Image (cartoon, rainbow, N blue to C red):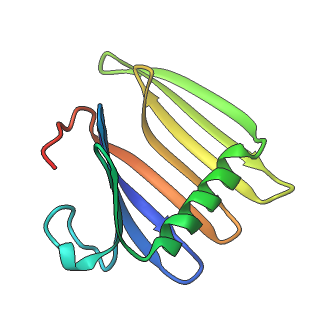
Amino acid sequence: MLRAGTFATPKETFYIYEVDEAGCYRLDFVKDGGNFMYDVDKIIYSIFKKKGTFTYGDKSIYETYQMISTTLEQAKYEESVETRWNNGKFYKFVSGENKKLGFTKESTLENGVLTENSIAGNGYAIAWSTVAPVYGVGI
């Protein structure tokens, strides 16, 4: 699966690209709107796992991302769910809010598969969208 998104911090915003296939994982943080796999000079941090783990760049960005992602995802949310059929596909929209902490989340599932996801709080935001459900390991 290839997912693309953004990771916004109070100081800057990064584009993020994630490839997650059997036996292979890659996560890139890219600055200034760089394109995945083409603008390698704009990669700030990259982690690649396949028979070992290889990293490149400023690890503090990845550590901050992991900390924020875990904090926002593990919070309890008051959720609302909306479902509907559209063009033969079943959609489920879930939105949640933690008013005490000021966190929000939204996700979209298409035929039971997560296609979009966003979480935000404390000046940070992470948003994802599935670009290709089956990407293939050509990396």
Farthest residue to the bottom: give it.
11
Q: Is residue 28 visible?
A: no
Q: Which of these two is toward me, 32 or 88?
A: 32
Quadrant in which the N terminus is drawn: top left
- Spot occupied by residue 73 in the image (x, y as percentages of width and height): 65, 46
Q: Is residue 65 left or right of residue 130?
A: right
Position of residue 54 relative to residue 130, above or below, is: below
Q: Position of residue 128 (x, y in %)?
A: 43, 50
Is residue 133 visible in this depiction of the protein?
A: yes
Q: Foreground: 7 or 52?
A: 52
In this view, which residue lies farthest toward the top?
A: 88
Quarter of the image for residue 111 reads top left
Toward the right, the furthest residue is: 100
Residue at the location (21% across, 62% down)?
36
Q: Position of residue 30 (x, y in %)?
A: 32, 71
Q: How many marks?
A: 0
Residue nearest the observer in this picture, 90 or 58: 58
Q: Is residue 135 above or below residue 68?
A: above
**Displayed quadrant of residue 37:** bottom left
In the rendered view, does 8 fall on the left or right side of 137? right
Residue 134 sits above or below residue 18 on the image: above
Residue 17, relative to residue 59: is it above or below? Answer: above
**Residue placed most toward the observer, 55 or 70:** 55
The residue that appears at 63% across and 61% down in the rendered structure is 68
94 sits left or right of 75 in the view: left
Residue at the spot 43% in from the left edge and 77% down from the top edge: 58
* Residue located at (74% from left, 47% from top): 97
Q: Position of residue 103 (x, y in %)?
A: 72, 56
